[in-house]
Image (cartoon, rainbow, N blue to C red):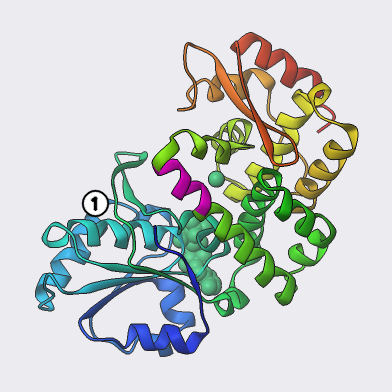
Amino acid sequence: MTEAEFVSSDKIKAALGGRNVYIVTDSNVAELYSDLFFSVRCTVIDAGEHSKNLYTVGGIIADMVRCGCDRKTTVIAVGGGVVGDTAGYAAASFMRGVDWINVPTTLLAMVDSGIGGKTGVDVGGYKNVAGAFHMPKRVLICTEFLRTLPEREWLCGCGEMIKHALLDENIFRATFPAIDKLIARDGETADKLIVMSARYKESVVKADFKEGGLRKRLNVGHTVGHAAEKLDDFRLSHGEYVALGIIAEMSMFRERISADYFDKAVGMARAVCSNGFPRLKAEDITEAAKGDKKNADGKIVVMLPTGGGNVEEIALAPEEFKERLASCLSDL
Ligand code: ADP
Ligand code: ZN
């Protein structure tokens, strides 16, 4: 398991200027950080999820061949989750696998998607169905990149950071009093919490290789979150739906959680997503949640944080899921 290194922009420049490297980035990052991309061996993919496909991977690999890359070439991904997933997959495939370095430039990629060695692309409208576990040799996190990150992408990362706070008591203690500063992008606060959040994700990934199943707790907020995201046509960022999912799922099982913990946890999630819950019907959310990959035996699974970093796995019949959701939906 690669441990992320927290570095300054000089270290990023040095890595990108290394011998026998091939860089992949996206159009937004290339424009904002043009000084970084002096190397001629570079693919700039169109920014956005639509680029996460096999054609892009093919384009990267073809260009690597044209540029004379070989088995010793190191691919460096500089960008958000789309660049990391796509370039990582190209690195996993090129000549049956070459080394790669991940340089995440979004908050989400720094604390979540950029950690764990999952690479892959969407095929035929299905997300991440072609992929490989291909651990990057290095993960270089430079939080200076975040200065240019749009607000929506910032909140996206904050949603997953709140989730990590519910999974780990130390992170909770550090995040709860600092939530407004984090949302307001206070540099010192954010830097400290980003390290904690990234390290937490690393620890879960590392433990899961041996224990199995631990990664499941990362699905807190995602049962309702994913369903709402699909039904709402991705209007908000993924992390905002996770925050909304946390509010909804904790409200559905309020009787299992202390009032104090509920108020604090939901308060943090609301700070991330102040828009309120989208106008969706409990029936539709239930229908969408039925397709969740965590489910088994026709039941819908919710991972419920109950305080102190504990998570309860609750499997319930779709009818009960719908009733519980319907009874709290109007208060969300
Ligand atoms: P994510 O990391 O959220 O999974 P993307 O890779 O799609 O997703 O990145 C989200 C958006 O943020 C893209 O439009 C990308 O070009 C842009 N982006 C990535 N890093 C930065 C940055 N440091 N500053 C500004 N925009 C960025
Ligand atoms: Zn997520």
- Is residue 207 in the magenta section? yes
Whether residue 329 is visible, yes or no, is no
**Does residue 230 appear to the left or right of 90 in the view shown?**
right
Position above or below: 11 against 123: below
Q: Residue at left 52%, top 20%?
A: 290
Q: Residue at left 54%, top 24%?
A: 288
- The quadrant where residue 18 appears: bottom left
Residue 21, image x, y percentages? 24, 79
- Residue at the farthest front position: 210
Q: Quadrant of the N terminus?
A: bottom left
Residue labelled with disc 1 = 54
Q: Quadrant of ligand 2?
A: top right
- Is residue 205 in the magenta section? yes
- The quadrant where residue 108 appears: bottom right
Q: Nearer the viewer, residue 101 or 156?
A: 101
Q: Specify the segment rendered in magenta.
A: 203-209
**Does residue 74 appear to the left or right of 65 in the view shown?**
right
**Does residue 148 appear to the left or right of 89 in the view shown?**
right
Q: Quadrant of the C terminus?
A: top right
Whether residue 179 is visible, yes or no, is yes
Disc 1: CA contacts within 10 A as few (<14), some (14-19) or many (>=20): some
Q: Residue at left 45%, top 57%?
A: 115
Q: Nearer the viewer, residue 264 or 82?
A: 264
Q: Main secondary structure of the magenta part?
A: helix
Instruction: Please state the total of marks drawn on the protein image.
Output: 1
Q: Nearer the viewer, residue 133 or 248?
A: 133
SS assignment at label 1? helix
Q: Residue at left 67%, top 11%?
A: 320
Residue 324, image x, y percentages? 74, 17
Q: Amino acid at mark 1?
A: Leu
Residue 62, image x, y percentages? 13, 66
